[in-house]
Image (spheres, rainbow, N blue to C red):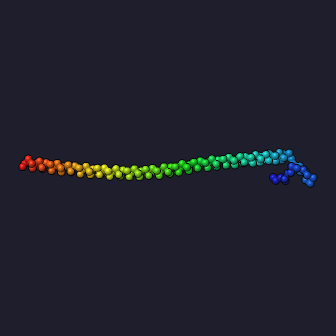
Amino acid sequence: MTLPSISQTDTANDSLICLPKRTLQQVIKDLESGDLASKELILERRINLHLQATVSVKDSIISVYKDKEDTYDAEIMLLNRKLGTKDEQLQLYQDRMNQYKTERNIAIGTGATIIIGILTAILAG
């Protein structure tokens, strides 16, 4: 049902329209509910903006922590490489030490053999 527009101000050129009380009550209810809906929409928009701002802040916090996590992962990789290099150096030093021990034992054995040979030659002679 379509109703003609109703003006709240009365001028000399306007004609007076009579509407049933029930129709006027419905128009008033509709206007009031429209006003309430308008206010509710404004509040919902404010809430939505606030929630968007909150989400934006949380997203930036998450982004910062992801960056920190990436940095920590990179540091861990570098430290693991450094540890691997230190392990390789340690192995080289241990290999050298074993080589020196072997050379020392050979030198001691050779020296002992020479001394025993000299003592044997002196005692036999």
Q: How many labels does the image show?
A: 0
Residue at the outermost bottom position: 13
Residue 56 spot, x, y in % from top left: 61, 49
> Residue drawn 14% across and 48% down?
115
Residue 68 spot, x, y in % from top left: 52, 49
Q: Which of 6 and 90 is in front in this view?
A: 90
> Residue drawn 50% across and 51% down?
70
The image quarter in which residue 21 lies: top right
Residue at the outermost right position: 12
Residue at the outermost left position: 125
Q: Nearer the viewer, residue 114 or 101?
A: 114
Q: Can residue 26 be seen in this view?
A: no
Q: Nearer the viewer, residue 58 or 77?
A: 77
Residue 66 spot, x, y in % from top left: 53, 50
Q: Is residue 35 left or right of residue 110?
A: right
> Residue drawn 17% across and 48% down?
112
Q: Is residue 28 visible?
A: yes
Q: In this view, does 18 lie to the left or right of 99?
A: right
Q: Is residue 117 left or right of residue 101?
A: left
> Residue drawn 82% across and 47% down?
27
Residue 85 spot, x, y in % from top left: 38, 52
Q: Which of 89 and 6 is in front in this view?
A: 89
Q: Is residue 49 left or right of residue 97?
A: right
